[in-house]
Image (cartoon, coloured by chain):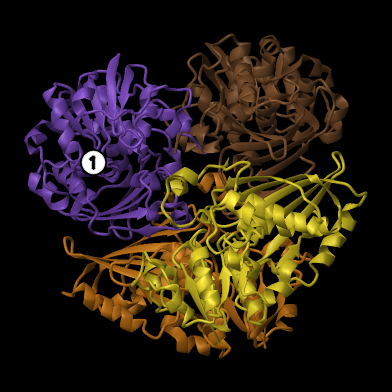
Chain colours: A yellow, B brown, C purple, D orange
Amino acid sequence: MVKVAIFGASGYTGQELTRILLGHPGVQLVAATSRRFAGLPIADVFPSLYGLTFLKYQNSTPEEIASICDIVFLALPHGVSMSMAPVFIAAGKKVIDLSADYRLRDLATYEAWYAQHSSAQILKDAVYGIPELYRLKIKNAKLVANPGCYPTSIILGLAPALKNKLLDVSTIIADSASGVSGAGRDPQTGSLFCEVDGGFKAYKVGKHRHTPEIEQELNALAGEKFAITFTPHLLPVKRGILSTIYAALKKDITLPEIYALYSSFYAAEKFVRVCPAGSYPNISSVCGSNYCDIGIVHDPRTKRIIIIAAIDNLIKGAAGQAVQNMNIVCSLEEDAGLKTAPLYP
Amino acid sequence: MVKVAIFGASGYTGQELTRILLGHPGVQLVAATSRRFAGLPIADVFPSLYGLTFLKYQNSTPEEIASICDIVFLALPHGVSMSMAPVFIAAGKKVIDLSADYRLRDLATYEAWYAQHSSAQILKDAVYGIPELYRLKIKNAKLVANPGCYPTSIILGLAPALKNKLLDVSTIIADSASGVSGAGRDPQTGSLFCEVDGGFKAYKVGKHRHTPEIEQELNALAGEKFAITFTPHLLPVKRGILSTIYAALKKDITLPEIYALYSSFYAAEKFVRVCPAGSYPNISSVCGSNYCDIGIVHDPRTKRIIIIAAIDNLIKGAAGQAVQNMNIVCSLEEDAGLKTAPLYP
Amino acid sequence: MVKVAIFGASGYTGQELTRILLGHPGVQLVAATSRRFAGLPIADVFPSLYGLTFLKYQNSTPEEIASICDIVFLALPHGVSMSMAPVFIAAGKKVIDLSADYRLRDLATYEAWYAQHSSAQILKDAVYGIPELYRLKIKNAKLVANPGCYPTSIILGLAPALKNKLLDVSTIIADSASGVSGAGRDPQTGSLFCEVDGGFKAYKVGKHRHTPEIEQELNALAGEKFAITFTPHLLPVKRGILSTIYAALKKDITLPEIYALYSSFYAAEKFVRVCPAGSYPNISSVCGSNYCDIGIVHDPRTKRIIIIAAIDNLIKGAAGQAVQNMNIVCSLEEDAGLKTAPLYP
Amino acid sequence: MVKVAIFGASGYTGQELTRILLGHPGVQLVAATSRRFAGLPIADVFPSLYGLTFLKYQNSTPEEIASICDIVFLALPHGVSMSMAPVFIAAGKKVIDLSADYRLRDLATYEAWYAQHSSAQILKDAVYGIPELYRLKIKNAKLVANPGCYPTSIILGLAPALKNKLLDVSTIIADSASGVSGAGRDPQTGSLFCEVDGGFKAYKVGKHRHTPEIEQELNALAGEKFAITFTPHLLPVKRGILSTIYAALKKDITLPEIYALYSSFYAAEKFVRVCPAGSYPNISSVCGSNYCDIGIVHDPRTKRIIIIAAIDNLIKGAAGQAVQNMNIVCSLEEDAGLKTAPLYP
């Protein structure tokens, strides 16, 4: 049994990691930290887990946690992870970091969009954790930089098209919408039920911090440098991200040919489902699962392709992908602990 | 007092018309028809109206209704309106038609996207009912073709930019999301609570029937012919449409200059609110009102402009705009019966 | 025009008061205070009100506000109102207090359930503000203690039955459920969208502070002293309270006779609607209005009567009833500013 | 591997059975019937299951299904099950019936509340399927009558109290609220998103068909005959039932003693969680799981006990309990296929 710990376990992502790891056949959850809830049973904070664990949140140092686990999940805000990760690396422990701190390979870009980096020296040890693109590198990584939720949906949605040079990359627009759990569990006015229910709005238009992360990976896939337009919206749902992605086709290609490329690209993947032609993804069809569903439409009137990708932002967009990465790092079955079917309705 | 009737009054749009007209100081609602609920008090079908009206749904012919009203609202499916409207026109009564039957000025386009037209001879009497664009024509129209909900948001969102030739029109993409009331009150699996709640999906991608209507008006505004990409999504809310519209700028213009153009364009309008810079519309901020809220973002990284427009689909997107048109036709104050502030939260 | 001010105007109740008063034909809103948002336009905090008012929140003393208004609404937490109200009374201004500070006529009960009272000397000037029960007293009151949301639904639901001695008062159980706006706009974990959506739970069972307020009025109606069981629940909706009230009948009476009593009791009331027999209230049928809808069921198998009452907690349960009380105090039409039909769906 | 079939698999309960059985380690799903969707892949109707099964809905006779399975789930409306079950019994196959047809041991009661029974002769072979009460009988039953959703929550909530004679049984009132999936997937106006969202109402007050089923089991537990008041409400959520149950205590007993009785009663049960004192169940804490959570409050002011029980109506209230029963009948681990933790948030 692999001994795992969660650093920062009392947010929604931390809870989701806890839930998944408690049901994982190959690991033992040895510690979960929370400053706010230190000393309290996890099940007091999340009664859904009552009876499933007797673990209490602890307020421990990274050194203490590193001494008792084989691998650690950092479910911390950006800026905090960067102060913790080096301790685990130094102790020879594997790190799955769910913050943004090690996702951007270019330090200057990180510091332009986020803040000064205090542990840039270990950036070279980090691998961007989309298994469908970087499986082999992840296997040997000391630190996996688990992707952002929006980027996961957009990168998986575009990867086959970019790899196959189908698109005029200067025309890419990603219009995304996320459930509220993406904003975390800290009380803030904008996440109140009365502010969100019945509403729908765009936010941080043109300046969301996931933009450089998306561009880094899309550029790598296409083998050229370009910028995209990315517009996030807030959905009145708890879980789910849907990205509707627009681009002009630069190749003369039919929709069935595009479907064939996508199906072939993801043929061996357990967690990417290319929807049957004519069927589009719905976030409620992936809710509670690690799936990314992808649908494709060709609009001959405007010569554009429209790619739609749906994930559960807390699972494939966070905790589930993190466990998938852990499974790869630890040589477990890649879908261990992640076989749960979507919960519908 | 103007005598008004509603033909097809038991759907969501019909109910909304009923509610607004009952509170309108200048009109008297003399009849409301429904085949399904004929004989039942309106308040039995919609208990929210209990105590506000004793009117019963009746199953009457257009001729009967024409004989007792000055103006009629047709809240009927497309294909049905076209068989009713000529009766009212022939009787010298004004018609506000909420179907799609008279919105497309080009008969061939109508028949390509919808069905054969049985009363094309009165198309010439119809005026497309966006008061902000066609106020004078509406005033003298025999028949006002009340716009579709999606088109209202997109046309109002783009009008100042197109009139001022700011955009590369070949790049326009409208990504819209609507509340479920847009699908009507007829029971269908896709509108069930369990199918919609917690979900979000695109539908009819690249083939929604509002596309030619949007293009007709955008082309007229720009003075040139072009196609757009329009993607509707289904939101888990009852009311509201948000359209996020993308286009490349072809003019060198600053965001404050764009705001100035928009503010000036809509300066005299009571129902269009240009949001303060940095603030984006939310459907919950227009819910229950006839407002269209518009926000604008300039993305210098990609030289695109992003325009966001929000309406209540049942009000500015249907019944409210219909009453606004009636007010113009009947020389009433344009906001009579429509002064209700949005209901928030 | 009556000059009105709102003290504490940036919560949900304060916003609702603002919205109603801006649309009220007989009053002028001269000031709205908020410490948190002082200096900001109201419409910046609540964009739904954009274009409807240019007023800014101000951070003023009660003395300053008293000098410019005829009547003030105190939309403050309990414990704060009691320090403000005496200033307005001393200045000869009428007060509508939406806190709990002056609702309990018995000081000891107040101090047992709430806290020490700092202005008990003006308790004698306060009238409990349910117009349907205390209209004449309200007319001459210096201070109207606006009822709590749960109590309003339960008291109106039981008043005719208690006045007519129908019930074994020892058996009364009120099972209520409220929308989240009742918890206010301050950010707290329990009001987050992700905590509330998809959920339903009881809270403060057997110890909610509305209990003594409900009992005070029910006891007064029945003319005897008794305790009730009151269980509040949290609903995943923004607005609305439904109270399902159980009691054993002590009189041999038929359901039509009970309906007759209720209809007669509320015959002259504009804001209480006794539903047709066989029809039960739904909070969505009163949403956005000042109505209280009441339905009655007789269960002959258990000889119990079940009374169901629905209100919009922010309107009849708070701001609407407060304006209704203001109208009475100021000799305006009782429904002035409150004629809006419920917004459905 | 046990060979299982689902008769009537395209409703919400049928889908939930499908989902659970596909993830069950000890069974093979050999057939799923649906007249409406015959010939279509299950995953076309429920895209959430895409990739998890290639099974198609078939329109087969009971005889055909009986010939290929060891045990069958009947997820059919009452009145239909009674015509199918005898075929399976005659073929020597075990039946888990999710309809009401075999729940009431008294034929006259069934026919008074439902309809004429066409296979009353096999009522004697039926066992009411609450494992916590009838485990041994279930083990040997030919037919398990899977309980209704409301009854499950109320019976589990009251069982320890009734077994221990704590309650004045003449005072029992069960106030329940259910998510919309309980109404099934057939399109009907009352289940539309726009009719349900933002709403809350009681329905079928005093006459819901679950009443005799609840009374049958409560009477059996108490060893005496009595009637209860049961009021169902419709919640704007997809899944979940919360029952708040009121009764007068007839024994002098403290809350800790009651908790001790409950904890002891359910000590060996895997799917009943007695909440820590002071903590009340929330339907969102059991969502997606087979748990029943129970909380208890003592109101010394009124000498009443308030018991609150929460389940996921599609799992412990239907498909999950059905699989639990199947596990018992087939001598599998009782929680096989049912270990999924609740999905929160």
In the figure, is residue A229 to the left or right of D192? right
Q: Residues within 10 Å of mark 1 (few under 14, many from 20)?
A: many
Q: Chain of mark 1?
A: C
Task: Decide which of C251, A168 is in the foreground and name it.
Answer: A168
- State whether residue B200 appears in this view: no
Q: Looking at the picture, which amino acid does disc 1 mark?
A: Ala
In the figure, is residue D175 to the left or right of B144? left
Residue at image mark 1: C159
| Quadrant of the frame with the N terminus of chain A | bottom right
- In the image, residue D204 lies at what x, y percent? 44, 54
Task: Decide which of B69, D298 is in the foreground and name it.
Answer: D298
- In the image, residue B22 lies at what x, y percent? 49, 23
Find the residue positioned furthest to the left. C121
Residue at 29 percent of width and 46 percent of height? C150
Name above or below for residue C333 compared with residue C194.
above
Q: Quadrant of residue D174?
A: bottom left
Find the residue positioned furthest to the front. A121
| Quadrant of the frame with the C terminus of chain A | bottom right
- In the image, residue C190 lies at what x, y percent? 38, 55
Name above or below for residue B31 compared with residue D296.
above
Report helix, strand or loop for mark 1.
Answer: helix
- State whether residue A182 appears in this view: yes
Task: Decide which of C210, D112 is in the foreground and name it.
Answer: C210
- In the image, residue C174 lies at what x, y percent? 28, 53
Q: How many marks?
A: 1
